[in-house]
Amino acid sequence: MQTTADTLTPAEFADPTPTTARDQGSWRDFAVCKGQLQLFFAKNAERPQARARREAKAKALCDSCPVAEPCRSYARDNREYGYWAGESEEVRHLLGYTVTAPIGLRSRAVRVQLEELDAQSA
């Protein structure tokens, strides 16, 4: 009998053993954050204080989520932006995972490197 998302429990999704249902992304069906994207992705020009408040609310949801592990793996493996399973893209970057374009800490680091190069060539 083939396993489907309808027959798996949240505990089975947290199990690291690959399953057909998890490979298809069905762990999302059990995510506590479902329908609350505004907490997990920054608005344009979001201020640091607003980001801290938004991420604190997101973290509270992630801490109680039964599918945090597959969510975290998905974000790391797919170089996702936003707040996933208790990790921002900056935290993932500091842990050695990268996203496609520089943001946050990496953006500042790139900007500093460019400024240093400009200063050296002047």
Image: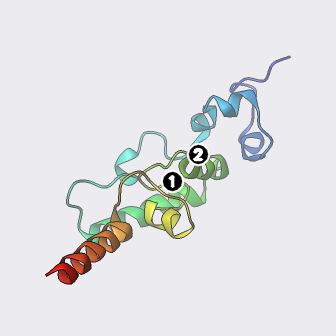
Mark 1, mark 2: which one is toward the viewer?
Answer: 2
Instruction: Please state which amino acid type lies under the numbered disc 2.
Output: Tyr
Q: Is residue 31 above or below residue 49?
A: above
- SS type, badge 2: helix
Q: Which residue lies under the disc numbered 1?
A: 84
Q: Is residue 53 left or right of residue 15?
A: left
Q: Measured from the top left, where is residue 111 in percent x and y?
A: 26, 71
* Residue carrying label 2: 74
Q: Residue at x 63, y 28 (%)?
A: 24
Can you see residue 52? no
> Which quarter of the picture shows residue 58?
bottom left
The one of 118 and 36 positioned closer to us in this rendering: 118
Which residue is most to the left?
122
Q: Position of residue 22 (x, y in %)?
A: 68, 34
Q: Secondary structure at mark 1?
A: loop
- For residue 72, which numbered disc appears in the image? none
Q: Amino acid at mark 1?
A: Trp
Cβ atoms at labels 1 and 2 below 8 Å apart: yes
Residue found at the very far right of the displayed protein:
1
The numbered mark, 1 or 2, whose residue comes first in the sequence reads 2
- Count residues near mark 2 (Cα–Cα under 10 Å), then give few for <14, some for 14-19, many for 20+: some
* Vertical placement of residue 17 versus 103, above or below: above
The residue under the point 54% across, 59% down is 97
Q: Residues within 10 Å of mark 1 (few under 14, many from 20)?
A: many
Residue 120, image x and y in percent? 22, 83
Which quarter of the figure is the N terminus placed in?
Answer: top right
